[in-house]
Image (cartoon, coloured by chain):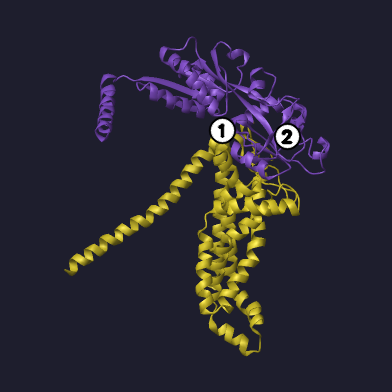
Chain colours: A yellow, B purple
Amino acid sequence: MIDRALKIDKYIRVLLLLFALSSLLFLFLIFIFILIEGLPLFLKVGLKNIIFGFKWAPTRGHFGIFPMIVSSFLVTLGALIVGGPLGLACATYLAEYAGKKRKLFLKPALELLAGIPSVVYGFLGVIYIVPIIRETLGGSGFSLLTASIILGIMILPTIISISYDSLMSVPRSYREGALALGATKWQTIRRVIIPAARSGIIAGFILGMGRAIGETMAVIMVAGNALKIPTSLLDPLRTLTSNIALELAYASGDHRKGLFSTGVVLLIIIMILNYIANFVVKKKAIK
Amino acid sequence: MKNILFLLILSTIFSCFQTKKVDHKKHAIMIAGSTSVMPFTEKLAEYFMVGHPTYIVNVQGGGSTAGIQATFYKTVDIGMSSRELHDEELNLKQTVICYDGIAVIVHPQNPVNNLSLEQVRDIFSGKIRNWKELSWIDRDIDAVTREEGSGTRGAFEELVMKKKAEISDAIMVQDSNGSVKEMVVTDPYAIGYISLGMVDSKVKALSVDGVMPTIQNIKNKSYKIVRPFIYLTNGEPSNDAKKFIDYVLSKEGQNILKKEGLVPVND
Protein backbone atom coordinates (compact mmCIF):
# COMPACT_ATOMS: atom_id res chain seq x y z
CA MET A 1 0.00 0.00 0.00
CA ILE A 2 2.63 2.45 1.05
CA ASP A 3 4.80 1.36 -1.85
CA ARG A 4 2.06 2.24 -4.27
CA ALA A 5 1.49 5.64 -2.73
CA LEU A 6 5.19 6.38 -2.89
CA LYS A 7 5.29 5.30 -6.51
CA ILE A 8 2.44 7.65 -7.38
CA ASP A 9 4.22 10.34 -5.49
CA LYS A 10 7.26 9.80 -7.67
CA TYR A 11 5.24 9.91 -10.87
CA ILE A 12 3.47 13.08 -9.84
CA ARG A 13 6.81 14.64 -9.10
CA VAL A 14 8.15 13.85 -12.56
CA LEU A 15 4.90 14.96 -14.19
CA LEU A 16 4.92 18.29 -12.41
CA LEU A 17 8.56 18.77 -13.28
CA LEU A 18 7.70 18.26 -16.95
CA PHE A 19 4.90 20.80 -16.76
CA ALA A 20 7.18 23.25 -15.01
CA LEU A 21 9.81 22.77 -17.69
CA SER A 22 7.23 23.26 -20.45
CA SER A 23 6.73 26.87 -19.42
CA LEU A 24 10.46 27.31 -19.74
CA LEU A 25 10.26 25.63 -23.13
CA PHE A 26 7.63 28.12 -24.29
CA LEU A 27 9.84 31.01 -23.26
CA PHE A 28 12.74 29.43 -25.11
CA LEU A 29 10.65 28.85 -28.25
CA ILE A 30 9.31 32.40 -28.26
CA PHE A 31 12.82 33.67 -27.93
CA ILE A 32 14.14 31.47 -30.73
CA PHE A 33 11.35 32.34 -33.15
CA ILE A 34 11.55 36.06 -32.58
CA LEU A 35 15.29 35.89 -33.12
CA ILE A 36 14.98 33.75 -36.27
CA GLU A 37 12.48 36.19 -37.76
CA GLY A 38 14.09 39.37 -36.51
CA LEU A 39 17.83 38.86 -36.70
CA PRO A 40 18.29 38.55 -40.50
CA LEU A 41 17.25 42.15 -40.92
CA PHE A 42 19.80 43.29 -38.35
CA LEU A 43 22.44 41.59 -40.45
CA LYS A 44 21.08 43.03 -43.69
CA VAL A 45 20.40 46.63 -42.67
CA GLY A 46 22.83 46.90 -39.79
CA LEU A 47 22.23 47.23 -36.07
CA LYS A 48 23.04 50.91 -36.07
CA ASN A 49 20.58 51.77 -38.83
CA ILE A 50 17.79 50.03 -36.99
CA ILE A 51 18.36 51.06 -33.40
CA PHE A 52 19.62 54.57 -34.11
CA GLY A 53 17.80 55.18 -37.39
CA PHE A 54 15.29 58.01 -37.31
CA LYS A 55 13.23 57.06 -40.34
CA TRP A 56 10.70 54.24 -40.36
CA ALA A 57 9.45 53.58 -43.89
CA PRO A 58 9.76 49.81 -44.20
CA THR A 59 8.24 49.60 -47.67
CA ARG A 60 11.02 51.90 -48.89
CA GLY A 61 13.84 50.25 -46.96
CA HIS A 62 14.12 52.47 -43.87
CA PHE A 63 13.88 50.58 -40.61
CA GLY A 64 14.90 53.12 -37.98
CA ILE A 65 13.10 52.56 -34.70
CA PHE A 66 14.96 55.07 -32.54
CA PRO A 67 11.94 57.40 -32.21
CA MET A 68 9.83 54.47 -31.01
CA ILE A 69 12.42 53.40 -28.44
CA VAL A 70 12.48 56.97 -27.11
CA SER A 71 8.68 57.15 -27.18
CA SER A 72 8.35 53.85 -25.34
CA PHE A 73 10.58 55.14 -22.56
CA LEU A 74 8.85 58.53 -22.46
CA VAL A 75 5.44 56.99 -22.08
CA THR A 76 6.75 54.58 -19.45
CA LEU A 77 8.31 57.44 -17.52
CA GLY A 78 5.02 59.32 -17.81
CA ALA A 79 3.14 56.31 -16.48
CA LEU A 80 5.53 56.09 -13.53
CA ILE A 81 5.08 59.78 -12.75
CA VAL A 82 1.31 59.31 -12.75
CA GLY A 83 1.11 55.85 -11.21
CA GLY A 84 4.17 55.78 -8.93
CA PRO A 85 3.20 58.27 -6.21
CA LEU A 86 -0.44 57.22 -6.42
CA GLY A 87 0.46 53.56 -6.08
CA LEU A 88 2.88 54.13 -3.23
CA ALA A 89 0.34 56.28 -1.39
CA CYS A 90 -2.30 53.61 -1.83
CA ALA A 91 0.06 50.85 -0.65
CA THR A 92 1.12 52.91 2.37
CA TYR A 93 -2.48 53.53 3.35
CA LEU A 94 -3.30 49.86 2.96
CA ALA A 95 -0.29 48.72 4.95
CA GLU A 96 -0.20 51.31 7.70
CA TYR A 97 -3.55 53.00 8.12
CA ALA A 98 -6.35 50.85 6.76
CA GLY A 99 -8.24 48.76 9.27
CA LYS A 100 -9.12 45.15 8.57
CA LYS A 101 -12.55 46.04 7.25
CA ARG A 102 -11.28 48.59 4.74
CA LYS A 103 -8.52 46.27 3.64
CA LEU A 104 -11.11 43.60 3.01
CA PHE A 105 -12.85 45.97 0.64
CA LEU A 106 -9.86 47.69 -0.98
CA LYS A 107 -7.72 44.69 -1.80
CA PRO A 108 -10.30 42.90 -3.99
CA ALA A 109 -11.13 46.21 -5.66
CA LEU A 110 -7.49 46.60 -6.65
CA GLU A 111 -7.37 43.06 -7.94
CA LEU A 112 -10.38 43.87 -10.08
CA LEU A 113 -8.52 46.88 -11.46
CA ALA A 114 -5.77 44.52 -12.57
CA GLY A 115 -8.30 42.29 -14.27
CA ILE A 116 -9.86 44.93 -16.51
CA PRO A 117 -8.81 44.22 -20.11
CA SER A 118 -6.54 46.82 -21.64
CA VAL A 119 -8.91 47.49 -24.54
CA VAL A 120 -11.42 48.78 -21.98
CA TYR A 121 -8.85 51.22 -20.62
CA GLY A 122 -8.12 52.33 -24.16
CA PHE A 123 -11.77 52.76 -24.97
CA LEU A 124 -12.40 54.87 -21.87
CA GLY A 125 -9.33 56.90 -22.78
CA VAL A 126 -10.62 57.60 -26.28
CA ILE A 127 -14.12 58.42 -25.11
CA TYR A 128 -13.32 60.57 -22.06
CA ILE A 129 -9.68 61.55 -21.58
CA VAL A 130 -8.88 62.38 -25.22
CA PRO A 131 -11.72 64.92 -25.65
CA ILE A 132 -11.06 66.48 -22.24
CA ILE A 133 -7.40 67.04 -23.10
CA ARG A 134 -8.23 68.28 -26.60
CA GLU A 135 -10.67 70.84 -25.24
CA THR A 136 -8.72 72.02 -22.20
CA LEU A 137 -5.07 71.77 -23.22
CA GLY A 138 -5.22 71.71 -27.01
CA GLY A 139 -3.66 69.37 -29.53
CA SER A 140 -5.57 66.43 -30.89
CA GLY A 141 -5.91 64.84 -27.47
CA PHE A 142 -4.13 61.72 -28.74
CA SER A 143 -0.92 62.37 -26.92
CA LEU A 144 1.92 61.42 -24.63
CA LEU A 145 -0.07 62.85 -21.75
CA THR A 146 -3.18 60.75 -22.45
CA ALA A 147 -1.14 57.59 -22.85
CA SER A 148 0.76 58.33 -19.62
CA ILE A 149 -2.45 58.79 -17.65
CA ILE A 150 -4.00 55.59 -18.98
CA LEU A 151 -0.83 53.58 -18.43
CA GLY A 152 -0.34 55.17 -15.02
CA ILE A 153 -3.70 53.76 -13.97
CA MET A 154 -2.96 50.42 -15.58
CA ILE A 155 0.28 49.89 -13.66
CA LEU A 156 -1.28 50.80 -10.30
CA PRO A 157 -2.15 47.21 -9.32
CA THR A 158 1.42 46.02 -9.97
CA ILE A 159 2.99 48.86 -8.01
CA ILE A 160 0.50 48.66 -5.16
CA SER A 161 0.65 44.93 -4.61
CA ILE A 162 4.44 44.70 -4.64
CA SER A 163 4.94 47.85 -2.54
CA TYR A 164 2.29 46.65 -0.12
CA ASP A 165 4.02 43.30 0.33
CA SER A 166 7.34 44.91 0.98
CA LEU A 167 5.85 47.44 3.41
CA MET A 168 4.16 44.62 5.27
CA SER A 169 7.41 42.70 5.52
CA VAL A 170 9.11 45.49 7.46
CA PRO A 171 9.55 43.97 10.97
CA ARG A 172 7.19 45.15 13.67
CA SER A 173 10.16 46.05 15.87
CA TYR A 174 11.10 48.90 13.46
CA ARG A 175 7.73 50.53 13.96
CA GLU A 176 7.77 50.02 17.69
CA GLY A 177 11.30 51.35 17.98
CA ALA A 178 10.47 54.53 16.04
CA LEU A 179 7.28 55.14 17.97
CA ALA A 180 9.07 54.53 21.27
CA LEU A 181 11.57 57.24 20.34
CA GLY A 182 8.70 59.68 20.07
CA ALA A 183 8.24 59.75 16.30
CA THR A 184 4.74 60.36 15.00
CA LYS A 185 3.13 57.81 12.76
CA TRP A 186 3.91 59.82 9.60
CA GLN A 187 7.51 60.33 10.70
CA THR A 188 7.80 56.60 11.29
CA ILE A 189 6.46 55.81 7.84
CA ARG A 190 8.56 58.40 6.06
CA ARG A 191 11.85 57.92 7.89
CA VAL A 192 11.78 54.28 8.86
CA ILE A 193 9.29 52.08 7.07
CA ILE A 194 9.51 53.35 3.49
CA PRO A 195 13.33 53.41 3.54
CA ALA A 196 13.34 49.90 4.95
CA ALA A 197 10.99 48.72 2.23
CA ARG A 198 12.79 50.70 -0.44
CA SER A 199 14.14 47.85 -2.52
CA GLY A 200 10.73 46.16 -2.76
CA ILE A 201 9.08 49.44 -3.73
CA ILE A 202 11.69 50.03 -6.42
CA ALA A 203 11.16 46.50 -7.70
CA GLY A 204 7.43 47.26 -7.90
CA PHE A 205 8.14 50.41 -9.90
CA ILE A 206 10.39 48.52 -12.28
CA LEU A 207 7.86 45.76 -12.83
CA GLY A 208 5.26 48.50 -13.39
CA MET A 209 7.59 49.92 -16.02
CA GLY A 210 7.76 46.50 -17.65
CA ARG A 211 3.99 46.41 -17.78
CA ALA A 212 3.79 49.93 -19.22
CA ILE A 213 6.40 49.33 -21.89
CA GLY A 214 4.72 46.11 -22.98
CA GLU A 215 1.19 47.47 -23.10
CA THR A 216 -0.16 47.65 -26.64
CA MET A 217 -3.87 47.94 -27.20
CA ALA A 218 -4.63 50.83 -24.88
CA VAL A 219 -1.63 52.74 -26.19
CA ILE A 220 -2.57 52.31 -29.85
CA MET A 221 -6.01 53.65 -29.06
CA VAL A 222 -4.93 56.84 -27.27
CA ALA A 223 -1.40 57.68 -28.41
CA GLY A 224 -2.09 58.80 -31.99
CA ASN A 225 0.80 56.65 -33.29
CA ALA A 226 2.70 59.37 -35.15
CA LEU A 227 6.26 58.36 -35.93
CA LYS A 228 8.02 61.50 -34.72
CA ILE A 229 9.63 61.80 -31.29
CA PRO A 230 7.16 63.92 -29.32
CA THR A 231 8.42 67.39 -28.45
CA SER A 232 5.63 68.24 -26.03
CA LEU A 233 3.25 66.41 -23.71
CA LEU A 234 0.47 67.00 -26.22
CA ASP A 235 2.23 65.42 -29.21
CA PRO A 236 1.21 61.99 -30.45
CA LEU A 237 3.74 59.18 -30.33
CA ARG A 238 4.27 55.57 -31.33
CA THR A 239 5.72 52.94 -29.03
CA LEU A 240 7.55 49.75 -30.02
CA THR A 241 4.57 47.56 -29.23
CA SER A 242 2.10 49.74 -31.15
CA ASN A 243 4.38 49.64 -34.15
CA ILE A 244 4.16 45.86 -34.31
CA ALA A 245 0.42 45.65 -33.76
CA LEU A 246 -0.42 48.54 -36.11
CA GLU A 247 1.42 47.26 -39.12
CA LEU A 248 1.42 43.49 -38.84
CA ALA A 249 -1.81 43.05 -40.78
CA TYR A 250 -0.47 43.97 -44.21
CA ALA A 251 3.24 43.55 -43.67
CA SER A 252 5.15 41.17 -45.90
CA GLY A 253 8.79 40.52 -46.73
CA ASP A 254 11.29 42.88 -45.13
CA HIS A 255 8.50 44.95 -43.60
CA ARG A 256 7.44 41.89 -41.60
CA LYS A 257 11.01 41.19 -40.60
CA GLY A 258 11.31 44.82 -39.52
CA LEU A 259 8.40 44.31 -37.16
CA PHE A 260 10.07 41.24 -35.70
CA SER A 261 13.25 43.29 -35.24
CA THR A 262 11.13 45.74 -33.27
CA GLY A 263 10.07 42.71 -31.23
CA VAL A 264 13.69 41.70 -30.60
CA VAL A 265 14.49 45.16 -29.25
CA LEU A 266 11.38 45.11 -27.08
CA LEU A 267 12.21 41.67 -25.73
CA ILE A 268 15.71 42.77 -24.78
CA ILE A 269 14.43 45.91 -23.03
CA ILE A 270 11.90 43.90 -21.03
CA MET A 271 14.52 41.30 -20.12
CA ILE A 272 16.80 44.03 -18.81
CA LEU A 273 13.98 45.54 -16.74
CA ASN A 274 13.07 42.17 -15.25
CA TYR A 275 16.67 41.46 -14.49
CA ILE A 276 17.06 44.78 -12.69
CA ALA A 277 13.90 44.14 -10.69
CA ASN A 278 15.13 40.70 -9.65
CA PHE A 279 18.52 42.10 -8.81
CA VAL A 280 17.06 44.78 -6.57
CA VAL A 281 14.94 42.25 -4.70
CA LYS A 282 17.79 39.77 -4.32
CA LYS A 283 20.14 42.40 -3.00
CA LYS A 284 17.66 43.04 -0.25
CA ALA A 285 17.35 39.35 0.53
CA ILE A 286 21.12 39.00 0.88
CA LYS A 287 21.23 41.98 3.18
CA MET B 1 -45.30 20.94 -43.34
CA LYS B 2 -42.77 19.24 -41.14
CA ASN B 3 -42.57 16.34 -43.56
CA ILE B 4 -41.92 18.60 -46.49
CA LEU B 5 -39.17 20.36 -44.59
CA PHE B 6 -37.65 17.04 -43.64
CA LEU B 7 -37.74 15.86 -47.23
CA LEU B 8 -36.17 19.08 -48.36
CA ILE B 9 -33.32 18.75 -45.90
CA LEU B 10 -32.84 15.13 -46.82
CA SER B 11 -32.75 15.87 -50.52
CA THR B 12 -30.28 18.67 -49.96
CA ILE B 13 -28.03 16.35 -48.03
CA PHE B 14 -28.30 13.73 -50.73
CA SER B 15 -27.64 16.18 -53.49
CA CYS B 16 -24.53 17.24 -51.62
CA PHE B 17 -23.31 13.68 -51.56
CA GLN B 18 -24.11 13.30 -55.20
CA THR B 19 -22.19 16.30 -56.44
CA LYS B 20 -19.28 15.12 -54.40
CA LYS B 21 -19.42 11.74 -55.99
CA VAL B 22 -19.81 12.97 -59.54
CA ASP B 23 -17.12 15.64 -59.43
CA HIS B 24 -14.07 14.18 -57.91
CA LYS B 25 -12.03 16.58 -59.94
CA LYS B 26 -12.76 20.04 -58.70
CA HIS B 27 -11.79 23.04 -60.75
CA ALA B 28 -9.24 25.00 -58.78
CA ILE B 29 -8.64 28.68 -59.45
CA MET B 30 -5.58 30.26 -57.89
CA ILE B 31 -5.70 34.03 -57.30
CA ALA B 32 -3.04 36.20 -55.64
CA GLY B 33 -1.90 39.81 -55.44
CA SER B 34 -2.99 43.13 -53.97
CA THR B 35 -4.04 43.00 -50.34
CA SER B 36 -6.56 45.76 -51.08
CA VAL B 37 -8.39 43.65 -53.64
CA MET B 38 -8.02 40.44 -51.65
CA PRO B 39 -10.91 40.88 -49.17
CA PHE B 40 -13.33 41.68 -51.97
CA THR B 41 -12.11 38.80 -54.11
CA GLU B 42 -12.56 36.50 -51.13
CA LYS B 43 -16.13 37.67 -50.77
CA LEU B 44 -16.79 37.21 -54.48
CA ALA B 45 -15.18 33.78 -54.34
CA GLU B 46 -17.48 32.72 -51.51
CA TYR B 47 -20.58 33.66 -53.49
CA PHE B 48 -19.12 32.14 -56.64
CA MET B 49 -18.42 28.81 -54.94
CA VAL B 50 -21.99 28.64 -53.65
CA GLY B 51 -23.30 28.89 -57.20
CA HIS B 52 -20.55 26.71 -58.65
CA PRO B 53 -19.92 23.96 -56.12
CA THR B 54 -17.39 22.21 -58.33
CA TYR B 55 -15.00 25.13 -58.18
CA ILE B 56 -12.45 25.93 -55.52
CA VAL B 57 -11.17 29.48 -55.54
CA ASN B 58 -7.99 30.02 -53.58
CA VAL B 59 -7.29 33.68 -52.80
CA GLN B 60 -3.98 34.93 -51.43
CA GLY B 61 -2.35 38.31 -50.77
CA GLY B 62 1.23 39.35 -51.40
CA GLY B 63 0.74 42.79 -52.87
CA SER B 64 0.11 44.14 -56.36
CA THR B 65 3.67 43.70 -57.54
CA ALA B 66 3.82 40.11 -56.34
CA GLY B 67 0.48 39.45 -58.05
CA ILE B 68 1.73 40.89 -61.32
CA GLN B 69 4.87 38.80 -61.17
CA ALA B 70 2.99 35.65 -60.26
CA THR B 71 0.71 36.19 -63.25
CA PHE B 72 3.71 36.72 -65.47
CA TYR B 73 5.30 33.45 -64.35
CA LYS B 74 1.91 31.70 -64.54
CA THR B 75 2.05 30.56 -60.92
CA VAL B 76 -1.48 31.89 -60.50
CA ASP B 77 -4.53 31.85 -62.76
CA ILE B 78 -5.52 35.40 -61.94
CA GLY B 79 -3.38 38.17 -60.47
CA MET B 80 -4.86 41.08 -58.52
CA SER B 81 -3.54 44.61 -58.77
CA SER B 82 -4.74 47.84 -57.22
CA ARG B 83 -2.44 50.03 -59.29
CA GLU B 84 -2.15 50.80 -62.96
CA LEU B 85 0.45 48.63 -64.67
CA HIS B 86 3.87 50.00 -65.53
CA ASP B 87 4.99 50.02 -69.15
CA GLU B 88 7.02 46.82 -68.94
CA GLU B 89 4.07 44.99 -67.39
CA LEU B 90 1.58 45.90 -70.08
CA ASN B 91 1.83 42.59 -71.94
CA LEU B 92 -0.53 41.08 -69.35
CA LYS B 93 -4.23 41.09 -70.08
CA GLN B 94 -6.07 43.43 -67.72
CA THR B 95 -9.69 43.37 -66.64
CA VAL B 96 -10.82 46.25 -64.47
CA ILE B 97 -13.41 44.84 -62.08
CA CYS B 98 -14.26 48.00 -60.18
CA TYR B 99 -12.92 51.33 -58.91
CA ASP B 100 -12.04 52.29 -55.38
CA GLY B 101 -12.39 55.98 -54.58
CA ILE B 102 -10.65 57.56 -51.61
CA ALA B 103 -12.50 60.40 -49.94
CA VAL B 104 -10.80 63.13 -47.90
CA ILE B 105 -12.97 63.59 -44.84
CA VAL B 106 -13.41 66.17 -42.09
CA HIS B 107 -15.79 66.70 -39.18
CA PRO B 108 -19.29 67.84 -40.27
CA GLN B 109 -18.87 71.10 -38.33
CA ASN B 110 -15.78 72.00 -40.32
CA PRO B 111 -16.72 74.84 -42.72
CA VAL B 112 -14.07 73.88 -45.28
CA ASN B 113 -15.76 72.24 -48.27
CA ASN B 114 -13.13 72.11 -50.94
CA LEU B 115 -9.39 71.64 -51.11
CA SER B 116 -7.08 71.51 -54.06
CA LEU B 117 -5.12 68.32 -54.56
CA GLU B 118 -2.03 70.33 -53.74
CA GLN B 119 -3.51 71.53 -50.45
CA VAL B 120 -4.35 67.95 -49.48
CA ARG B 121 -0.77 66.97 -50.29
CA ASP B 122 0.61 69.88 -48.25
CA ILE B 123 -1.53 68.96 -45.24
CA PHE B 124 -0.24 65.41 -45.22
CA SER B 125 3.35 66.37 -45.95
CA GLY B 126 3.22 68.75 -42.99
CA LYS B 127 3.56 71.95 -45.01
CA ILE B 128 0.12 73.22 -44.05
CA ARG B 129 -0.33 72.75 -40.32
CA ASN B 130 -2.97 75.24 -39.29
CA TRP B 131 -6.60 75.58 -40.35
CA LYS B 132 -5.95 79.32 -40.60
CA GLU B 133 -4.01 78.68 -43.78
CA LEU B 134 -7.20 77.16 -45.19
CA SER B 135 -9.21 80.20 -44.08
CA TRP B 136 -10.72 78.76 -40.94
CA ILE B 137 -9.79 79.28 -37.29
CA ASP B 138 -6.30 79.48 -35.83
CA ARG B 139 -6.01 75.84 -34.76
CA ASP B 140 -3.57 73.06 -35.59
CA ILE B 141 -4.79 70.49 -38.08
CA ASP B 142 -5.10 67.00 -36.60
CA ALA B 143 -4.28 65.00 -39.70
CA VAL B 144 -4.53 61.22 -39.55
CA THR B 145 -3.18 58.73 -42.05
CA ARG B 146 -3.11 54.95 -42.45
CA GLU B 147 -0.28 52.67 -41.39
CA GLU B 148 2.60 51.70 -43.64
CA GLY B 149 1.68 48.72 -45.79
CA SER B 150 -2.02 49.55 -46.01
CA GLY B 151 -3.43 49.53 -49.54
CA THR B 152 -5.42 52.70 -48.94
CA ARG B 153 -2.26 54.48 -47.81
CA GLY B 154 -0.42 53.12 -50.84
CA ALA B 155 -3.08 54.49 -53.15
CA PHE B 156 -3.14 57.82 -51.33
CA GLU B 157 0.63 58.13 -51.62
CA GLU B 158 0.47 57.32 -55.30
CA LEU B 159 -2.51 59.51 -56.22
CA VAL B 160 -2.13 62.47 -53.87
CA MET B 161 1.46 62.67 -52.65
CA LYS B 162 2.71 61.44 -56.04
CA LYS B 163 6.47 61.61 -56.00
CA LYS B 164 6.53 65.21 -54.92
CA ALA B 165 6.30 64.74 -51.16
CA GLU B 166 6.16 62.13 -48.41
CA ILE B 167 3.58 61.80 -45.69
CA SER B 168 5.08 63.56 -42.68
CA ASP B 169 6.04 61.46 -39.68
CA ALA B 170 4.39 63.96 -37.35
CA ILE B 171 0.99 62.90 -38.61
CA MET B 172 -1.12 60.52 -36.58
CA VAL B 173 -1.62 56.95 -37.74
CA GLN B 174 -4.56 54.58 -37.39
CA ASP B 175 -4.75 51.04 -38.64
CA SER B 176 -8.13 50.83 -40.36
CA ASN B 177 -10.65 52.87 -42.32
CA GLY B 178 -12.92 52.53 -39.31
CA SER B 179 -10.53 54.01 -36.77
CA VAL B 180 -9.55 56.88 -39.09
CA LYS B 181 -13.24 57.66 -39.47
CA GLU B 182 -13.82 57.41 -35.71
CA MET B 183 -11.04 59.92 -35.12
CA VAL B 184 -12.58 62.38 -37.58
CA VAL B 185 -16.05 61.85 -36.12
CA THR B 186 -14.85 62.76 -32.62
CA ASP B 187 -12.32 65.50 -33.39
CA PRO B 188 -13.68 68.68 -35.06
CA TYR B 189 -10.18 69.66 -36.21
CA ALA B 190 -9.25 66.34 -37.78
CA ILE B 191 -8.77 65.42 -41.41
CA GLY B 192 -8.25 61.97 -42.82
CA TYR B 193 -8.90 59.79 -45.83
CA ILE B 194 -10.94 56.62 -46.15
CA SER B 195 -12.44 54.37 -48.79
CA LEU B 196 -15.44 56.02 -50.41
CA GLY B 197 -17.69 53.15 -49.36
CA MET B 198 -17.11 54.01 -45.70
CA VAL B 199 -18.30 57.62 -45.98
CA ASP B 200 -21.62 58.41 -44.31
CA SER B 201 -23.37 61.37 -42.70
CA LYS B 202 -21.15 61.26 -39.59
CA VAL B 203 -18.28 62.75 -41.59
CA LYS B 204 -18.04 65.29 -44.38
CA ALA B 205 -16.30 64.32 -47.59
CA LEU B 206 -14.44 67.22 -49.19
CA SER B 207 -14.47 67.98 -52.86
CA VAL B 208 -10.99 67.92 -54.32
CA ASP B 209 -10.20 70.50 -57.01
CA GLY B 210 -13.94 71.26 -56.95
CA VAL B 211 -15.05 67.71 -57.69
CA MET B 212 -17.10 65.78 -55.12
CA PRO B 213 -16.17 62.12 -54.58
CA THR B 214 -19.33 60.51 -55.91
CA ILE B 215 -19.87 57.34 -57.89
CA GLN B 216 -20.86 59.50 -60.85
CA ASN B 217 -17.70 61.57 -60.74
CA ILE B 218 -15.55 58.49 -60.38
CA LYS B 219 -17.17 56.93 -63.43
CA ASN B 220 -16.71 59.98 -65.61
CA LYS B 221 -13.12 60.21 -64.33
CA SER B 222 -13.41 63.78 -63.05
CA TYR B 223 -12.61 62.77 -59.46
CA LYS B 224 -8.91 62.06 -59.29
CA ILE B 225 -8.25 60.09 -56.10
CA VAL B 226 -9.37 56.79 -57.57
CA ARG B 227 -7.60 53.55 -58.23
CA PRO B 228 -8.76 50.64 -60.32
CA PHE B 229 -9.01 47.11 -59.00
CA ILE B 230 -7.62 44.96 -61.79
CA TYR B 231 -7.60 41.24 -62.50
CA LEU B 232 -4.64 40.13 -64.59
CA THR B 233 -4.15 37.08 -66.74
CA ASN B 234 -1.20 36.00 -68.80
CA GLY B 235 -2.77 35.96 -72.24
CA GLU B 236 -6.37 34.84 -72.55
CA PRO B 237 -7.69 33.46 -69.25
CA SER B 238 -8.13 29.70 -68.87
CA ASN B 239 -11.70 28.45 -69.00
CA ASP B 240 -11.94 28.22 -65.24
CA ALA B 241 -10.48 31.67 -64.69
CA LYS B 242 -12.74 33.11 -67.34
CA LYS B 243 -15.79 31.69 -65.59
CA PHE B 244 -14.82 33.49 -62.37
CA ILE B 245 -14.00 36.77 -64.10
CA ASP B 246 -17.31 36.61 -65.97
CA TYR B 247 -19.07 36.07 -62.67
CA VAL B 248 -17.34 39.09 -61.13
CA LEU B 249 -18.37 41.24 -64.09
CA SER B 250 -21.93 39.89 -64.04
CA LYS B 251 -24.72 41.86 -62.45
CA GLU B 252 -24.58 39.69 -59.33
CA GLY B 253 -20.83 40.09 -58.88
CA GLN B 254 -20.90 43.82 -59.48
CA ASN B 255 -23.72 44.20 -56.98
CA ILE B 256 -21.63 42.48 -54.34
CA LEU B 257 -18.82 44.96 -55.00
CA LYS B 258 -21.25 47.85 -54.91
CA LYS B 259 -22.53 46.74 -51.52
CA GLU B 260 -18.94 46.79 -50.27
CA GLY B 261 -18.69 50.46 -51.20
CA LEU B 262 -16.78 50.09 -54.44
CA VAL B 263 -17.70 51.61 -57.75
CA PRO B 264 -18.75 48.93 -60.25
CA VAL B 265 -17.65 49.08 -63.90
CA ASN B 266 -20.85 47.59 -65.31
CA ASP B 267 -23.97 49.08 -63.88
> Which of A10/A46 is in front?
A10
Q: Identify the residue position indicated by label 2 in the image.
A: B124
Q: Residue at x 70, y 19 (%)?
A: B222
Does B30 sit left or right of A257 as displayed?
left
Residue B55 found in image quarter: top left
Give the residue pinned by disc 1.
Answer: A254
Q: Chain of mark 1?
A: A
Residue at left 31%, top 19%? B25
Residue A1's place in the image compared with A209, above or below, is below
Q: Is residue B74 visible?
A: no
For label 2, the crowd category at 10 Å Cα-Cα, with few meaning under 14, some 14 to 19 and many 20 or more, is many
Foreground: disc 2 or disc 1: 2
Percent of width and height locating residue B68: 54, 19
Residue B200 visible in rendering: yes
Q: Position of residue A282 (x, y in %)?
A: 52, 67
- Residue B157: where, in percent of width, then height? 67, 28
Looking at the rendering, in which quadrant would you find the N terminus of chain A? Answer: bottom left
Q: Amino acid at mark 1?
A: Asp
Q: What whole-number distance in Å separates the C-alpha atoms at marks 2 and 1?
A: 25 Å
Compare residues A114 and A61 and report the one nearer the observer.
Answer: A114
Host chain of mark 2: B
Which quadrant: the C terminus of chain A? bottom right
- Front residue of B114 and B60: B114
Q: Secondary structure at mark 1?
A: helix
Residue B95 in the figure: left or right of residue B9: right
